Image (cartoon, rainbow, N blue to C red):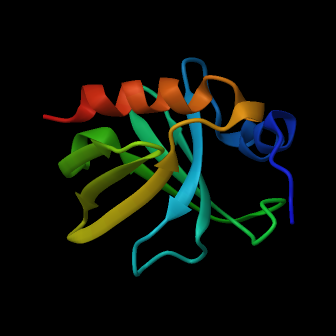
Amino acid sequence: MFILTKKGLQHLADPYITDGSVMAYGNWQSFNAPASRCLLVLDDSHLQILSLNLFSTKVLYTQTIPLAELEAIQLKQYVATATFHFAYAKQGYRFQLPLAILPLGNGQAAFLTRCQALVR
């Protein structure tokens, strides 16, 4: 078992975070996912996907996607989770994000609020 901490995830995302960025932790559920755990970093112009190893201690793969190129964006919220879908370069992406992770504070909620603004 592993323990998620804000400091640990912040350390992994630090090279990718800019002013005004929000971050969320979740599961990457697409067929093209290199690993199931991921951090999503969203700023005003890009979405960065950081694929993490099994214990969420190392970034294995990064992908930067310009927000202007996202298509078919969907955000669906359920009781304890939210699903975030979009298409980019003719590939579908799907992420499952817990609505709240207590050690991370309100980071998940801030990310989901930003995603809601992207839905057209």
Residue 40 in the image, given as x and y percentages of width and height: 54, 46
User: What residue is at 57 percent from the left and 77 percent from the top?
Assistant: 34
Residue nearest the viewer, comparing 7 with 61: 7
Would residue 40 be found to the left or right of residue 29 on screen?
Answer: right
Give the total number of marks visible in the rendering.
0
Residue nearest the viewer, comparing 45 with 80: 80
Q: What is the residue that sits farthest to the front in this orientation? A: 79
Q: Quadrant of residue 100?
A: top right
Residue 36 in the image, given as x and y percentages of width and height: 58, 71
Q: Quadrant of residue 38?
A: bottom right
Q: Quadrant of residue 55?
A: bottom right
**Image quadrant containing the C terminus:** top left
**Image quadrant containing the N terminus:** bottom right
Residue 84 in the image, given as x and y percentages of width and height: 35, 50
Query: In this picture, is 93 found above or below 74?
Result: below
Residue 72 in the image, given as x and y percentages of width and height: 15, 52
Query: In this picture, is 10 found above or below 28?
Result: above
User: What residue is at 50 percent from the left and 65 percent from the top?
Assistant: 28
Q: What is the residue that sits farthest to the bottom in this orientation? A: 31
Query: In this picture, is 67 found above or below 107?
Result: below
User: What residue is at 61 percent from the left and 74 percent from the top?
Assistant: 35
User: What residue is at 60 percent from the left and 28 percent from the top?
Assistant: 107
